[in-house]
Image (spheres, rainbow, N blue to C red):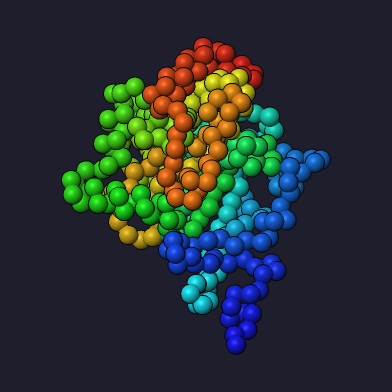
Amino acid sequence: MGTDGDRGGESAGVHELRFDPFLDEWVMIACARHARPDRPSGDCPFCVGGLEAPEPYRVKAFPNRFPALVPGEGAQREVGPYGAAPPAGACEVVLYSPDHDARLYQLAQDQVEELVDLWAERTAALGARSEIEYVLVFENRGEEVGVTIHHPHGQIYAFSFVPPLVARRLASETRHFRQTGRCLRCEAAAFERSGPRLVIENDSWSGYIPFAARWPFGVHLVTRRHVGSLPELDAGERRDLARILRRLVAGFDALFDRSFPFMMLVYQTPTDGREHPEAHLHIEFFPPLRGPRQVKYVAGVETGTGTHANPTSPEEKAAELRAALERAVGGQAPGREVDL
C-alpha cells in the first residue's frame, strides 16, 4: 500500500501545481493564499507610508505577499494518474496611484501612460526568465469579483506554462493563420469596427463588444496594428492605450452611476521561445453586471460545460455603453471633475 505522499495525501501548507488529466490542465494549489487579508481594516497597505508603499510613488510594482506562483525550478512527479510540479513563476501587484480613492479616468493622462510603461517593463523582465512561458497583466475591480482592497491596483502573473484558455485561443488563431495567412483577431476587429457593436476607438485601438459576446458588457480592446505584446507598442500606441482605457472606464462608471465592477485581462504573445505570428495583443473586460442591480452569474450549465449563455444582445449593450461614454466625455462621469 502506498504512503500518503504516494497518494498525494499531504495538504497542510501545500504550494504546487497539480495536473488534471481529464482537462489536460494545470491547477494552482496555493494554501498560503487562504491567509491573505479579507477586506483588511485599518491603514491601507497600498497608501504611501503603508506596508507595501513606505516611500512616495506614482506607479509601483512589487512581489505579492500571498502568491499562487513563486520563483524556482524543480522536477515534475507522478501522483497516481495525476502529476505535480513546483509552482514556478511569479506574482506581482501593480499600484496605479498613491490616491486611495482615485478612479483610472481621474488620473492624469501622463500617469496612466506611466502605468502602461510599467506593465510593458514588467512583461519584458518577467518574460525574459527562462522558466516563464506566459505573462498575464490583469485587474479585478469591485467586490462582485472578490476585490478585498479598493486602492486602485492590478496584478501580474508570470506562468511556467501557457494557461489553458490562452492555449485554446492560440490554437484556433494558429489554424486560421496557417489556412489563410491572416490574423484572425485583425479580421474580427476590422469587421466589428464597421458594425453596431463598436463602442470606442482612436488612432491605435478599437473597442467593441464582439458578435459572440459571453458577457453583457464584455468589451474587447484591440490594437489596430498587428502587434503581439505590450513591450512592442510604440510611444503613440502606448499613449492611445492610456487614453482609451481612461475613457472606457469612465463610460463603464457612467452606465449605472457607480464604480463598475469588472475583470480586465491583457492577452499577449507567449514568452515560451517560439514564434507566434498568430498572436495579437488585446484586452478583454469581463463585467458581471447586466443591469444596475442585476448580476450575470456564471451558473451550473456554464461552469459545468463551458457553454456560455448571454441573456442580453451585444448590439443593445454596445449602444447603451456608447451612450454612457457620451455622458462621461461630456463631463458627467461619476466622481471628481476629469479631463477626458
Question: Residue, x 48% and y 46% (percent of image)?
Answer: 301
Question: Is 325 situated left or right of 334 in this image?
Answer: left
In this view, which residue lies farthest toward the bottom? 1
Quadrant of the rendering where the N terminus is positioned: bottom right
What percent of the width, then of the height, locates residue 122?
51, 49
Question: Is 312 situated left or right of 294 in this image?
Answer: left
What percent of the width, then of the height, locates residue 135?
47, 52
Question: Is 301 situated left or right of 104 in this image?
Answer: left
Indicate whether 287 appears above or below 18: above
Asked whether the viewer can see residue 22, the reply is: yes
Question: Residue, x 70% and y 69% (percent of image)?
Answer: 12
Question: Residue, x 68% and y 29% (percent of image)?
Answer: 101
Nearer to us in this view, 68 or 294: 294
Indicate whether 129 appears above or below 196: below
Indicate whether 48 appears above or below 331: below
Indicate whether 196 appears above or below 261: above
In this view, which residue lies farthest toward the right? 42
